[in-house]
Amino acid sequence: MRKQTGFTILELMIVVAIVGVLGSLALAGLKEWNRSARRTAAVSDFLSALHVARSEAVKRNVRVGVCPSEDSDQADATCLVTKDWAVGWIVFVDADGDMSRADDEEILGTSQALAVPWTLASSNGDIALDFRPNGRIETSTLAKSADFNLCDDRGPTEGRVISVSISGRPQTGLSAQDGSDPQC
């Protein structure tokens, strides 16, 4: 008589249960990793727009503005009067220095709206930034610097702050320039 080899139904059920538990743990970790990756992409997109605006202002020796815009994909995009930057934004040559895009001012860059549940808002109410030809900033609230809070439904612990100092240097961090947490 030959000895039979194989798995019993009990052994098979235990293996399936272990695989299910490990799979659910991996899925939860994958979701968090995905959200963190999307946060990093949103921060990089906004930071890149600020870098482009500053470098173009210095290179062209003109004022370059950045403002929120819902119609950033249109050739006639306009600035919105809002501190909610999650709607999208445009980078433009601000020839008249009014921090708002006129029809004859060239668009240098655009970004579409951030996906839900992301928010990007100015903590001091800035509705526009202008980079001067020397690379320094001027804010719509006449503050010496600007902080923008990127948040989702996880709250301030997972939020990021994009800060622009008076010198015009943009940077990102876990807290604002005054040391406060993101305002989510």
Image (cartoon, rainbow, N blue to C red):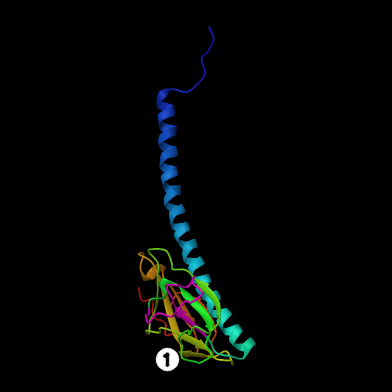
Q: Which residues are magenta?
A: 65-83
Horizontal and vertical percent position of residue 121: 39, 76
The quarter of the picture where residue 119 lies is bottom left
Q: Quadrant of residue 184?
A: bottom left
- Single out the residue that lies furthest toward the top: 1
| Secondary structure of residue under mark 1 | loop
Q: Residue at x 43, y 27 (%)?
A: 11
Relative image position of residue 7 (x, y in whole percent): 47, 23
Using the image as rendered, state which of residue 60 and residue 28 is in the foreground. Answer: 60
Residue 114 colored in magenta in the image = no
Q: Please give the name of the residue rendered at 42% of the width and 89% of the height, measured from the top-left corner.
A: 140
Q: Is residue 26 above or below residue 92?
A: above
* As drawn, 1 above or below 70: above
The image shows residue 160, relative to residue 103, as above or below, that is: above
Is 69 a magenta residue? Answer: yes
Q: Is residue 38 left or right of residue 182?
A: right
Q: Amino acid at mark 1?
A: Ala
Q: Which residue is mark 1?
A: 143
Residue 36, percent from left and from top: 47, 62
- Of 180 and 37, which appears nearest the observer? 37
- Residue 84 location (% of width, % of height): 38, 76
Q: How many marks?
A: 1
Is residue 100 at least partly visible in the picture?
yes
Q: Is residue 176 visible?
A: no
Mark 1 surroundings within 10 Å by alpha-carbon count, few (fewer than 14), some (14 through 19), many (20 or more): some
Q: Is residue 19 left or right of residue 64?
A: left
Residue at image coords 41%, 39% = 20
Q: Looking at this view, is 5 or 112 the one in front?
A: 112
Dominant secondary structure, magenta: loop
